Image (cartoon, grey):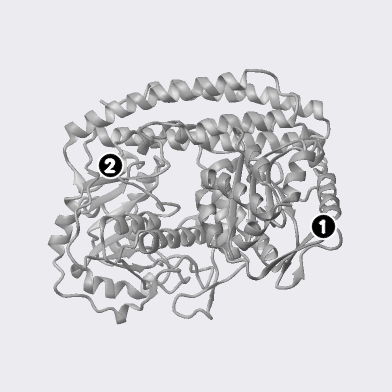
Amino acid sequence: MDLEKNYQNNMTFLKEGWPEVYNSIIKADIKDYELNITQLGEYNIAIKGKNIYPGKVDLAIQAQVNAFLDNPPMFFKKPTWNKDSDKDYYHDKLIKGIELKSEYLKENKGFENYHENLEGYFPFLLMMGIGSGAHIQKLIQQSNGIKEIIIVDESYEMLKVSFHLLDWRPIFMYFKQKNHGLHFCIGSNSQEISRIVLNTIYKNFSYQFYLIPFYTHYKSKFFDEFKEKFIEKIDIAFTGQGFYDDEIISLEHTIKNLNDDLPVYRYSNKLPKNSTAFIVASGPSIDKDIEYIKKHKDNVVLISCGTALRVLYKNGISPDFHMEIERPTFMASIIENYGTKEYLKNIDMIGLNVIDPKVYSMFKSAKIYFRDNDAGSSIVPEDIPKLNHCNPTIVNGALSFLSDIGFQNIFMFGTDMGFKDPESHHSKDTIYYNTKEHKVNTLDLLKEKFPGNFDKEEKFMTTNIFNWCKQRAENCILDYKVKRKIKINYFNCSDGLYIDGTTPFKAESIKLDNKINKVDILKGIENNFDFDFEKLHKEIDSIYKSEKEMLISNIKEIKEIVTQKEIETFKELFDLISTTYEIANNPNYENKSYLTRSLLKGTMYHFYTALYTHALATSDKNKAMNFVNSSLLKLLEFFEEVENRVKDINLK
């Protein structure tokens, strides 16, 4: 066994395909690791003097691989069954249509033996533990194929040791095949690694969230913690995938808003020094701070978020800007309850491109900004910012916009994201207590309680949506403060959940800079918007025509793959899924726009997860394949719908 030769060969190959991993291995110090090799070539790996393998290593690894292939441990989410929708969405009808023909639902049986239908094939494998690496090699050789693999470990040192023991080049070459992938997620923080793994799946093959085989190579506290954190977070991964009708609405509303000549956030002109904003949301703690906000509103830029506008109205306050992010057409009927027509017509609005034009017409003036991963954003020039972190709530949209445009001080009021008393989940001045659908018994309460902002020993209740909002806000703050290294002070003045990255700050402790010139800040905001509508329309018209052509081309390519042959095995099904999903998820556009991705990806995700979970749970394989092939015909009808709908959406 030539240890140094193995290492150099592996590193040469790694440097080309995985340069970041290569650099980390170069830095790795393996002083705590030992390779114990006998004269017969038998080996073991010791960490701080303790062997990780029992007895003869090859026999132990082979026995482990055999046991895994016989009965692979898996996270398998129960096949979907969507409730009847009150909305006339094509997406809902498509998914419901294939579920109604599910043989699994007709059988009304359990689904414990679903892995047998895979016949030793793994569309995805989550590997915990590098060890010698021999188990990965054996799995490739003895399984019926592995398409994607994520390898998790707590240190690059183990990978460095493995590179001396094993020639990894066949493993690298195997996963270099088309529609295959090898991903390393390595680090000592189990929570952070669980987040990275979730993001890797989400970005590359999110349809696999419903079927995740776990291979644990050796036991450790780190792997136990990682798996626990991963399973905790996986429910959030099922959300935010989007769907076709939502994106079509975005495209239609974006086109209408552009046709109405709404100014577009485009430039990066700096705001005056110490530009300060108050974000006002409608959490219950806003009620105790409302008098402070009223007193100091003229010294800051005051931003109302959604239902908080009614709170301000009831307290005789007008914001400098009102913000919204939601696209449904019924939003206008909700917003008209926030204040009188005269009140709304004296307020300027800033909102996402996706908002119904009727909403913008209710205000004094309107400006729009764009978000990423959105059909409407796919048709505008690259230099127009597409902001991340804008959902799920208006607070997220406001936080992202204010961070991006250049505010240095952002104070957050009413952003509780939780509550002490489930009967008091919003401000008393909101509409939430007037309608049946917002009664507390309908809130999606989490079992876990979370630390408070002002006292971490104090625990708050929250819901799925508030917890998601909190996590996205934390991601936004991390992005701007840490990754982009922009100096922004985030002050959380809310008596709710602690938000990582913010400074807890009670309203009475705030000392504002009296030298702040609010007029200059408002002028600075104005200067970051594009008012040259003629030029903007020409740019967008050219991009949109190109995007439509690429969309039609992508659909044609996907349809050719789907109609190539009938599916006979689950391996063929997952090959089809990964190939077609790759076209929708990562279209190789020169101008890096994503109309195809926006319109197709979400519904294809939901369609494919429903398709393979129902098929895998069906005990009779022939019935399962008949279900698959008849359902794929419905997918072809979906593509026809997309083509026909987009043809009718045009700039003026």
Q: Toward the viewer: 81 or 538? A: 538
Quarter of the rendering occupied by the C terminus:
top left
Q: Quadrant of residue 98?
A: top right
Q: Secondary structure at mark 2?
A: loop
User: Would you call the spot at circle 1 few (<14 residues within 10 Å), some (14-19), or many (20 or more)?
Assistant: few
For this rendering, which residue is in front, 142 or 535? 142
Kindly identify the residue that appears in the image at 80 percent across and 43 percent down: 111
Residue 643 placement (x, y as % from top left): 46, 22
Residue at the location (24% across, 60% down)? 319
Dot 2 corresponds to which residue?
A: 383
Q: CA distance from mark 1 to mark 2?
A: 59 Å
In the rendered image, the vertical position of residue 354 relative to residue 178, given as above or below: below
Residue 362 picture location, percent across and down: 26, 45
Judging by the rendered image, the residue that carries numbered circle 1 is 42
Q: Which residue is drawn at the image coordinates 40% and 52% (left, top)?
A: 390
Amino acid at the residue labelled 2: Asp
Could you classify mark 2 by the number of other residues whose Cα lies within 10 Å: few (under 14), some (14-19), or many (20 or more)? few
Identify the mark nearer the N-term, 1 or 2.
1
